[in-house]
Amino acid sequence: MKFRETQVIVFANQKGGCGKTSSLVSTAAAFAASGYSVCVVDTDPQCDSTGNLGVDPDAMIRQRRYTLADAYLSKVPAAQIAVTPEDRFGGLISVVPGHRALSSVEIRLEREVFGLLVHNGISEDSMEELRHEHRFRLRASLDSLRGRFDVVLIDTPPNLGFLMTSALVAADWCVIPTFPSGYDLKALQVITRTVEKIRKSYNPGLSLAGVLLGNYDRKAILDKEIHVALCKRFTPALVFATTIGRSVRFRESTERGITIFEHPDAKEQAANCAALVKEMINRGAKGAFGATLNPFPGTELVEQVIDSGLEDVETVNG
C-alpha cells in the first residue's frame, strides 16, 4: 500500500450535471496511473461510474454475482462484491458495481423496520436503532476494503437521500465537485451544510477534502473570478487549486466507456487530472496519507464560512 491506511473519499453533490461521476472516474484513473490501487464504489442507481469502468450491472445479476445493493440488503462485505477488469490499468482499479435495485433500497429497509413493528411490537427507540444500523451498513461493508486498496472512491446519486447519507457516513473525506454557475454555487451551500450535519450526527471523522471546480474555461474571465471568489470566501484550504478544464474529451471518454487516461487524444486533460491527484496527496492528512505537506481542513471551517454567506460569489456570478 502507498498510504499507511486506506483512504475512503466520497464525491458528493446533490445537484446533477456538475461533473461528479466524470471527476471521480478521472481521479480513479489518475491514482491508478500513478501506481495506487483504487476501488470505485457506485451508490448511484444510474450506475454511470460502473459502466464507465467496463462493468455491466445486469451481467453481474445474470452471473448470479453480488452488486452494491446486496451490501445494504444482505450485509455482504464489499470485498466479496468488488470486480477487477484485468485488461485495464493492470488490475489497479476495481469496482463495487451499482445496480438500479439501489433505487428501492431505502424503501425495502424501511419495510423491514415496519415489519418488526407490526409483528414484534418493537419500541420507537428500537426502530430508530435499526434505522441507525441501516445508515451504517455501507460503512460496515466498506470496512472489508480497508487494507486492500490505497484509495476507495464513492460515487453518489444527485440527491440528499438515504444513499447519499450512507456514503457520507462511510467516508473519511468528501470532495464536492461544482461548476462555475449560479445554480451550482447555491447547491454548494446545501451540500456543505449536509456534510457538516453528517459529521456531527454520525461520522465525526468526516472531513472536507475540498471543493473541485470543473467545466472550467481558463480563458473566461468570469470563471477565473468565480474561482478567486470561492477561494476568498471558503479560504484556499477549502478549494482545490487544480481545476478541471472544459473539454469535449471528457464527453467522448464517457461515450466510449473509457477513462480520460485511455483516450488517445486527451493527454492534456489526463495531465490535468494527474495534477489534481498530486494536490490531493500533498494536502492529505499527516499520519493518514503519510508524510505530506498540509492537512485537509475539517468541516468546522466550512460551517463558519457558510454562516457568513456566499455574497461575494453570488455578486461575481450575477
Image (spheres, rainbow, N blue to C red):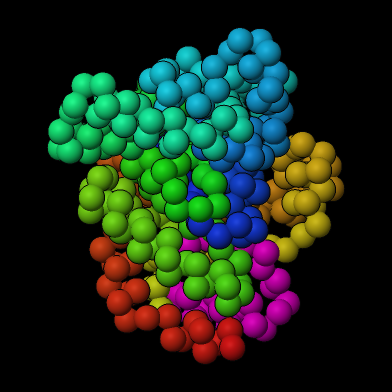
Q: Position of residue 249 (x, y in %)?
A: 79, 52
Q: Position of residue 35 (x, y in %)?
A: 56, 31
* Observer-nearest of 283 and 106: 106
**Residue sitting at the far top:** 64
Q: Is residue 59 left or right of residue 228?
A: right
Which image quadrant: the C terminus? bottom right
Please tell me whether residue 151 is drawn above or below residue 82 in the rendered image: below
Q: Position of residue 111 (x, y in %)?
A: 38, 30
Which image quadrant: the N terminus? top left
Residue at the (42%, 80%) spot, across then down: 310
Q: Is residue 227 left or right of residue 205?
A: right
Residue 213 is inside the magenta segment: yes
Does the image show residue 30? no
Does the image show residue 247? yes
Residue at the (50%, 26%) spot, across then down: 69
Q: Is residue 147 left or right of residue 254?
A: left
What is the span of residues highlighted in magenta in the rendered image? 211-232
**Residue sitting at the far right:** 265
Please tell me whether residue 224 is drawn above or below residue 246 in the rendered image: below
Please tell me whether residue 275 is drawn above or below residue 223 in the rendered image: above
* Observer-nearest of 39 and 159: 159
Q: Position of residue 226 (x, y in %)?
A: 56, 79
**Residue sitting at the far front:** 118
Residue at the (75%, 51%) spot, across then down: 250
Q: Quadrant of residue 127?
A: top left
